[in-house]
Image: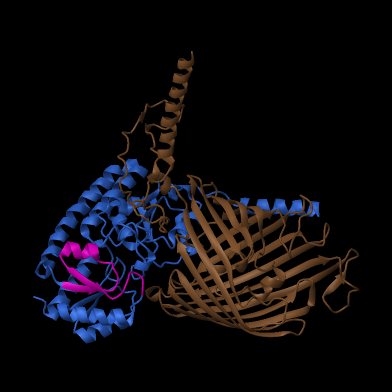
Chain colours: A brown, B blue
């Protein structure tokens, strides 16, 4: 009896080992022949599996008999899962570093540190299945880790729909949709800082539905989005009903093969941080003109862009309203109407050099009598497509009367396979 | 708040619903080639059973095309997208496909053809590659269409794909392909004969656009104006190149029409070589209206340059 029991244990052990061993062989990557302790994963996009040295010959394919596995089930060879295929299905991975430095004086509360790794963004992007793709952008800044964006995009819907679900930057204007590393500046415009939630901006968990209206005259796209509504400095969602809505209509037209016009109107509405019953509405308009001669596309280009935003914010905590400060009493609190905008250009004058400027003007959302104004000159050098060095001279005149003259500089660098950006 | 919010939600939801979904019109298949070369080969096979357009122009660097929304409109109505592949379009095509709202073109869809899958690809890197090597293509050199044999393979793949999408016209596509194949074979004889005297001739090219062309016509590429793929010329590399060209007696510098001629011209002045702006694609010059004219133009121009330089 005892022997029998022992044999049973042995048998169990053998079975476990063999199945466990098989499973191990299936999931672990092939040991690297290099003596280096940390074999770095290939930074290149995954579709090109690097040749696996000493890869065991694949087992003969097992045929699924037609009709087996349920109606509509797969037939033909069963997929073989091994180290090589697990690597093939890895998402494209990239890390982008955004290093910022600042010199000169800024006595306002918006001064940035002298030197900082402002943000490290890790991106993971891949096709989910035949119907969708997914994109994750995780940001690491100072002591914080956050999901800047993480969403699924359903790309195969009928009737020209495109649906995104997850955490996203809202489709409000141009700058709000940009990650730090794609902006032509080291900072965000004053209008974004004052009226559109600064760096975080309109960004939260939500659902985005957009539809293309194909026609021969222009590209026309309408987007409707709903977000939970928790966006510091902008919207708050004490209750489930306090969601934020964002809508955008975007048009685009080629003027010639090298010039085009891109324009849009945006709207956002939600409960603000003053609590239930207090809302903020934003209306935005943006216009972009681009020139890029095709024969010299890698040497010359020009982008001129302007965005303006009107903010309408219910506020509970005001003192008595003055007749001329843009606020009015509505019996419940006060409402502040603020306006802001910027004009910017970015001109590429050589294969690796860009120069530009930006003019800023923005009232404060909760006190339109305070007006911030600024001007910046920029010069950017691209050692390659994967790194940029930028200098920005910025003069700011804050509403409180503080003036700041600063030189900001930025190093952007990217490793790995980062998907191309939308236009 | 609530009533207003839900009203806004309804409006927001209804807004995108306005407008009827487009139905695929009966008639010719809408085919988009990412380059004019692919569009030309598709036209050879598809004839009047397809309507074909291209995205990048022949005089444009196909690595750096802008992902313009107007391309989204083209892709939206396409039945077939033919891409060069090998990551040539990686900087601009994927976001366009994502926004196209066209299930057929999504990777793995029936309407997506990667023309490189059947072509003869050179310079597939082996071993570890890093971006210290410049803008290397991990899946091999994507300029493979610059070899008529590959043109034939691409046309064959297009014929197969069109027959899948439009089986009723399979015989038409087969006969168009056979006709193209015959004309290409005749043209290849002509091009091979014209280039035969220059087999083994040493040349320098700006970018690594010409390995398939050079292999086919027996040209020996001994260096590049770019120090590394996608990296602009540097003074030290240019000096090295001048030394090497002098040492080996290289008389021809091939340049694509979208590169600046300043460095090639100064190298030419130092070495006594000639700068020849060749067409990398159909459409690079007005007269290059199809895939045959592309090689006619390049072979004629190159032969003239070799003759002028006194190479054999």
B187, A216: nearer the viewer: B187
Residue at 82% across, 61% down: A278
Which portion, as a residue range, is magenta? B202-231
Up the image or down, B107 lies above or below A220; here it is: above
Using the rendered view, name the quadrant where residue A251 is placed: bottom right
Q: Is residue A403 left or right of residue A274?
A: left
Using the rendered view, name the quadrant where residue B238 is placed: bottom left
In this rendering, does residue B270 appear at all?
Answer: yes
B50, A348: nearer the viewer: A348
Coordinates of residue A120 in the picture (x, y in percent): 55, 64
A306, A170: nearer the viewer: A170
Could you tell me how many numbered marks the image carries?
0
Residue at 14% across, 80% down: B309
Residue at 66% across, 64% down: A200
Up the image or down, B144 lies above or below A2; here it is: below
In this rendering, does residue B28 appear at all?
Answer: no
């Amino acid at each position: 009896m005892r022997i029998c029991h022992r044999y049973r244990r042995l048998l169990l052990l053998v079975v476990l080992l063999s199945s466990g061993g098989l499973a191990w062989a299936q999931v672990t990557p092939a040991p690297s022949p290099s003596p280096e302790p940390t074999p770095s994963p290939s930074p290149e996009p995954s579709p090109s599996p690097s040749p696996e040295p000493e890869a065991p010959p694949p087992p003969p394919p097992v045929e699924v008999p037609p009709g087996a596995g349920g109606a509509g089930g797969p037939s033909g060879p069963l997929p073989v899962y091994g180290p090589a295929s697990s690597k093939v299905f890895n998402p494209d991975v990239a890390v982008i570093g955004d290093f910022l430095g600042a010199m000169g004086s800024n006595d306002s509360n918006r001064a940035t540190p002298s030197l900082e790794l402002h943000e490290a963004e890790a991106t993971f992007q891949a096709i989910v299945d035949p119907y969708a793709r997914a994109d994750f952008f995780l940001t690491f800044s100072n002591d914080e880790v956050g999901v800047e964006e993480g969403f699924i995009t359903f790309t195969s819907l009928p009737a020209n729909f495109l649906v995104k679900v997850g955490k996203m930057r809202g489709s409000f204007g141009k700058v709000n949709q940009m990650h730090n590393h794609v902006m032509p500046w080291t900072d965000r415009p004053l209008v974004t800082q004052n009226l559109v939630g600064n760096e975080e901006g309109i960004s939260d968990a939500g659902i985005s539905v957009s539809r293309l209206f194909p026609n021969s005259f222009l590209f026309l796209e309408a987007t409707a989005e709903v977000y939970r509504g928790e966006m510091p400095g902008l919207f708050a969602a004490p209750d489930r009903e306090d969601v934020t809505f964002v809508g955008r209509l975007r048009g685009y037209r080629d003027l010639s093969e090298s010039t085009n016009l891109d324009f849009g109107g945006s709207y956002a509405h939600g409960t603000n941080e003053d609590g239930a019953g207090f809302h903020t509405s934003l209306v935005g308009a943006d216009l972009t003109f681009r020139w890029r001669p095709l024969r010299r596309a890698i040497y010359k280009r020009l982008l001129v862009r302007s965005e303006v935003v009107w903010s309408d914010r219910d506020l509970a905590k005001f003192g008595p309203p003055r007749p001329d400060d843009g606020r009015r009493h509505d019996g419940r609190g006060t409402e502040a109407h603020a306006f802001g905008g910027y004009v910017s250009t970015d001109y590429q004058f050589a294969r690796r050099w860009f120069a530009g400027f930006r003019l800023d003007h923005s009232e404060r959302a909760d006190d339109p009598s305070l007006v911030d104004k600024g001007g910046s000159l920029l010069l950017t050098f691209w050692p390659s497509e994967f790194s940029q060095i930028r200098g920005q001279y910025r003069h700011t005149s804050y509403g409180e009367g503080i003036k700041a003259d600063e030189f900001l500089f930025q190093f952007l660098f990217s490793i790995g396979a980062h998907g191309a950006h939308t236009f | 708040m609530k009533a207003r919010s839900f009203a806004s939600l309804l409006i927001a939801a209804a807004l995108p619903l306005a407008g009827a979904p487009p139905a695929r019109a009966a008639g010719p298949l809408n085919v988009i080639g990412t380059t004019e070369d692919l569009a030309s080969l598709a036209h050879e096979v598809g004839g009047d059973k397809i309507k074909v357009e291209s995205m990048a122009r022949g005089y444009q660097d196909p690595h750096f095309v802008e992902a313009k929304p107007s391309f989204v409109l083209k892709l939206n109505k396409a039945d077939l997208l033919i891409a060069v592949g090998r990551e040539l379009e990686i900087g601009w095509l994927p976001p366009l496909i994502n926004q196209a709202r066209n299930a057929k073109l999504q990777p793995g869809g029936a309407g997506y053809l990667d023309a490189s899958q059947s072509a003869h690809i050179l310079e597939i890197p082996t071993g570890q590659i890093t971006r210290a090597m410049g803008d290397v293509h991990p899946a091999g050199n994507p300029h493979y269409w610059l070899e008529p044999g590959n043109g034939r393979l691409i046309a064959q793949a297009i014929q197969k794909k069109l027959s899948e999408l439009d089986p009723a016209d399979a015989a038409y596509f087969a006969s168009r392909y056979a006709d193209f194949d015959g004309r290409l074979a005749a043209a290849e004889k002509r091009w091979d004969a014209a280039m035969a005297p220059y087999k083994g001739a040493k040349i320098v090219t700006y970018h690594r656009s010409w390995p398939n062309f050079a292999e086919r016509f027996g040209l020996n590429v001994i260096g590049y104006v770019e120090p590394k793929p996608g990296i602009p010329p540097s003074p030290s590399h240019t000096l090295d190149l001048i030394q090497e060209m002098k040492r080996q007696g290289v008389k021809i510098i091939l340049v694509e029409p979208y590169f600046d001629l300043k460095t090639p011209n100064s190298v030419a002045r130092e070495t006594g070589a000639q700068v020849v702006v060749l067409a990398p694609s159909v459409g690079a010059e007005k007269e290059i209206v199809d895939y045959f004219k592309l090689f006619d133009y390049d072979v004629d121009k190159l032969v003239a340059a070799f003759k002028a330089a006194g190479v054999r």
